[in-house]
Image (tube, helix red, strand yellow):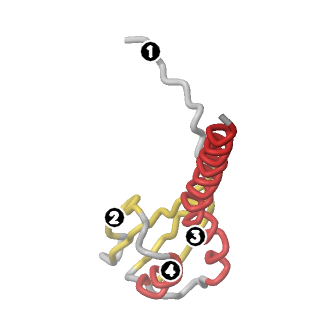
Amino acid sequence: MENAKLISKSLLLIYCAGCLLIGCVSNYVTWSTNANIKKIALGMSKDQVVSILGKDYLIASSSKNDYGKPVEILAYKSDSNEEYKLKFVNDQLMEWNREFINKYIIKDSSP
């Protein structure tokens, strides 16, 4: 009976440690984005920025400006409610900002 209690406590401890570890690992990408955003500078190439922030981004927008130069906006997840948007013109970082993502948007259900 005492062995069963010891095994139960050990399994519970392993389960709790596993949950904690999984939570930390899943947030590593967002934490590293927050830390690495301080390393980028306007004028950097897209390749330089991606080498700092990583390849885990979304292409939020892609177009051409009035002068025919390519414009691309990359989005990096920061934390559960934020993302960084980086604007490249002709493969050069021209602007970046951090946006709050409202995950509690209520959709209109009317026809």
Instruction: Name which quarter of the figure residue 92 lies in.
Output: bottom left
Label 2: state its secondary structure. strand
Q: Earlier in the sequence, mark 1 or mark 2?
A: 2
Question: For numbered disc 3, what is the local secondary structure?
Answer: strand
| Callouts 1 and 3 close, C-beta under 8 Å | no
Eyeballing the image, is 62 above or below 106? below
Return the residue found at the far top: 110
Sequence order check: which comes first, mark 1 or mark 3?
A: 3
Q: Along the horizontal axis of the image, is 101 left or right of 57?
A: right
Residue shown at 32% from the left, 65% from the top: 63
Rendering quarter of residue 69:
bottom left
Tell me whether the residue at label 4 lies in contact with that at label 2, contact meaning CB atoms closer than 8 angstroms: no
Q: Which one is earlier in the sequence, the residue at label 3 or at label 2?
A: 2
96 w.r.t. 60: above or below = below
Report crowding for label 1: few under 14, some 14 to 19, many 20 or more residues within 10 A (C-alpha). few
Name the residue that disc number 2 marks. Answer: 62
Badge 1 is on which residue?
Answer: 109
Residue that numbered label 4 is attached to: 93
| Type of the residue with mark 4 | Leu
Residue 46 at x, y percent in the picture: 43, 82
Q: Nearer the viewer, residue 29 or 22?
A: 22
Residues at marks 1 and 3, CA–CA distance in whole angstroms:
34 Å
